[in-house]
Amino acid sequence: MTTVAHQIMWNRLISVVEEQAQALIRTAFSTSVREAGDLSAGVYDAAGRMLAQAVTGTPGHVNAMADAVAHFIEAIGADTMAEGDVYITNDPWMGTGHLHDITVVTPAFHDGRHVGFFGCTAHVVDIGGRGFGADGNSIYEEGLQIPIMRFADRGRVNDTLLALLRVNTREPDQVIGDIYALAACNEIGQRRLSQMLSEYGLPGLESIAAFILDNSRRATLDRIAALPRASASTTMTIDGYATPLTLAVTVETHAPHVSPDLTRTSATDPKGINVPMVYTKAYACYALKCAIAPDIPNNAASLEPFHITAPENTIVNAVRPAPVALRHVIGHLIPDTVYGALDQILPDTVPAEGAGALCNFQVSLRHEDGLRSEVLCFNSGGTGARPALDGLNATAFPSGVMTMPVEATEHAGPVIIWRKELRPDSGGAGRLRGGLGQYMEVGARDGWLFDFSAMFDRARHPARGRAGGMDGAPTEVTLSDGTARPGKGRFAVPEGQTVRLAFPGGGGIGAPQDRDPEAIQRDLAQGYITPEAAQGTYGLSE
């Protein structure tokens, strides 16, 4: 078969998994999937190697899932797999890092022959335990654990598992609905794959897999070979839970590998902000791919040359039974840490520090009549300034998830979003300005009381500017009466009060005095900066 034909089939596989992801979005129950795109979808060969991923989805899910299918093969046994089977887990160390992510894997068959797998992951609104938050002291407090097992056996759904989920979760209809949506999107992928194989007269994925993996590996190695042979180190101090933590990395660019080493990073935390290695690897690899080989499709071979090292029992390589519910808060800061070192090797290539972690919160509501509701909301701060452009406002990097619309959040439960707007002056000033964060104000409808689970960082250690650029604004959490609340943890909101949030901005690049006066005037006209900042920080004359 010709190279052109193989390339066409490669593109076809990418479109298959994108349709798979879109099917999940259309059928999912949770707003985190439908509105924010907190999901992943991918196709694998029979050996469990990821061949293609959907464009829609998060790096944490996709890159973690790159390793997940091998665990399913080992646990289930390839010789026991049959058409109609569907497998499931939320094991943080074999899936995507915490219990709220459910991963579903389905073996794909063509003309009765096992040819590969489809896998997908989605974040569910609840999995029992304490609920989504950092307050757990071990994995056992964080919710129901689902080992790798059959969700469906030759087409017959595991009713016992569904019964366990129904009595252990606060929103069983949403959770079970999402699992069915995950299984359905894999089924869509199977159908399209079988159609493709029939169209090209192929018995399986062997030839196309070899083409994809060989070309991706070679292209990635060529990019690494063109890098200077160097080593650089950096550290980043972040909020942690009760005490600050240090993320430390040394990046070596020695062909045929790029090797970030996080050995000097802080030890595991008593609370649920720890990161399983699979998630650390996912985001470290993503950062490197964005900087070194952004145009090479993501698959097992293009990820292979990135070797991530972190000792066990550090916060970026937590082992069972460490609490890991908010592993994303630390994990999303790994790319900026890697970029702090990579900037020394490849100047003018990577952005300044940004908000990093998603600005998520969960609201647990209870009515005076006994009704209860859980509402999860995803939001973003600003990204760091880029080498030739300002940072992006209210944009999730590195996760890539979308901010939930106010209407979708209010439809999900009895909450009211009283305010949601950009936060002027929150982007770090500089020749290139950091992206802006947001203001939000959250309350409950009449007759409802609520607890608020904060999942924020950058409150005490905002995003740093680079090369003379200023830091972004920090995260702020207060009640409507002005009482300050912590950036992480669950707290009760007094009746009649609201929670006021100020999300962080990204760091700037270069001295503010070097910014183009026209850019300052444009920022002023758009409300991105105040007149005081234009004059006092940027030196713009009246």
Image: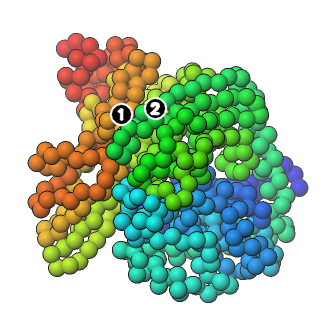
Sort mark 2 into few (<14), some (14-19) or many (20+) by Cα contacts within 10 Å: many
Q: Position of residue 5 (x, y in %)?
A: 81, 54
Q: Closest to the observer: 500 or 99?
A: 99
Q: Which residue is mark 2?
A: 236
Residue 477 found in image quarter: top left
Q: Residue at x 37, y 74 (%)?
A: 171
Q: Picture coordinates of residue 342 (x, y %)?
A: 58, 28
Looking at the image, do the residues carrying marks 2 and 1 touch, with CB atoms under 8 Å apart? yes
Q: Is residue 276 left or right of residue 362?
A: right
Q: Is residue 135 left or right of residue 367?
A: right
Total number of numbered discs in the rendering: 2
Q: Residue at x 82, y 67 (%)?
A: 204
Q: Secondary structure at mark 1?
A: loop
Determine if residue 504 is in view: no
Can you give x and y, in whole percent of width and height, for residue 405 in the image?
33, 56
Image quadrant in which the N terminus is located: bottom right
